[in-house]
Structures are given as structure tokens and as C-alpha cells.
Amino acid sequence: MSVLFQTTVCVDIQVLSPGEWTAFSYVSAPAPRYELALQGDANNLYAWLLGVRHQFTVQLTTHRWYHICLRWDTLNKSFSLTIGGNSEVYQRTAIARAIPPSGRLLLGCQANEASPGAKLATVELYLFRIWDDVGEHRACEDGTVIGWDSRLWAITRAQARVQDYTLQC
């Protein structure tokens, strides 16, 4: 990824079993913490921005799809989490610094720092996309930085290749 002064990251998530989960994480080379990430458990969503974990008291019901977006705007020092279009918006003020380039982006991989003895959830992800702005985007609109194209991703589990024709795009 290139340096991002503004970004929107959206992903559709379905939690299949309770526990801790990671939807995605992005780390730049020397950073010990996530530059950008989305995690959750039974009681909260955790959005990481530039090494700081922001906690949002949100419970996701199992076996239901949620459209979740993170937006970061350095000019306005604004960091937000949106669930289901614009129906639920959680806003934070954050450090005005760009997300650095050339990091490592992982989808659906559980973090190494999972709580000792924690139960890990099973989640499904769909339509992961990144744009270089903080605008609203159509349901099936491809990202300008990263799009939802399976040819771009290294798929490590055969189950991930199963097609579900009930999904919108």
C-alpha cells in the first residue's frame, strides 16, 4: 500500500462461533503494533489506528452479516467505525499522522497476542476493500487501493474458495 492520509476500509463480517477474532491487520516494517486493524470478541469491536487500540462497545450477533467500515482522515484527526451503512457511527479523535506504506496486510489471521487461553472465533469475511478517501462507496464498488479480487490474495484454506451465490456481489 502507498502512504494514506485518508482512507476507508470496508469488510463484510459474519461471526460463526463466539470468541476472539481478527478481520484484518496491517503492520509496517518496524512497527511493533498494528497501523490499522479490526478485531472483536463477544462484547466489543477493537479498531487499531497507528499503534493505538480503540474499543467500541458493540456486540455482533452470530450468523448475521455486518458491513463494517473504518475511516481515517488526518486533516480532521477523525477516526470512525461504521456498522451497516450509516446506521451506527462511532467517532474518535486521533493523532494526525498518515498510515505508512509498504507494510504487511493479512486477512482473517488471528493475532499472535491473543489472550492466553482465549477461545478463538470462526468468522467469514467478504468484500474487503480499501479506498484512498473518506467518502461513501456503493455496495459492490471496488476499492482504489485494494479491491476484492481473489486473484490478488493467497488463499490458504480450501473452504475459502467456496462460492456463495446468496452474497450481493
Image (spheres, grey):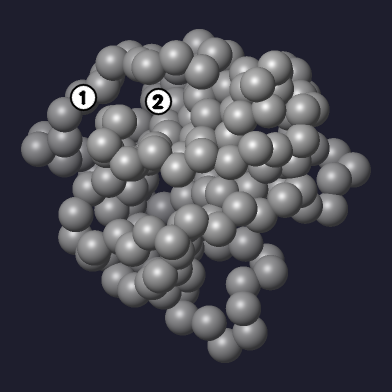
Disc 2 element: loop
**Mark 1 sits on what residue?**
169
Residue 166 in the image: x percent, y percent? 9, 38
Is residue 121 left or right of 39 when viewed as pictured? left
Residue 68 in the image: x percent, y percent? 37, 40
Viewport quadrant of the C terminus: top left
Callout 1: few (<14), some (14-19), or many (20+) C-alpha neighbours within 10 Å? few
Up/down of 148 relative to 13, above or below: above
Specify the label residue 24 is tagged with.
none
Residue type indicated by callout 2: Trp
Task: Tell me if label 2 and label 1 are in contact, CB under 8 Å.
Answer: yes
The Cα atoms of the two marked residues, 2 and 1, are separated by: 10 Å
Residue type indicated by callout 1: Cys
Nearest the viewer among 56 and 11 is 56
**Mark 2 sits on what residue?**
148
Which residue is most to the bottom? 117
Viewport quadrant of the N terminus: top right
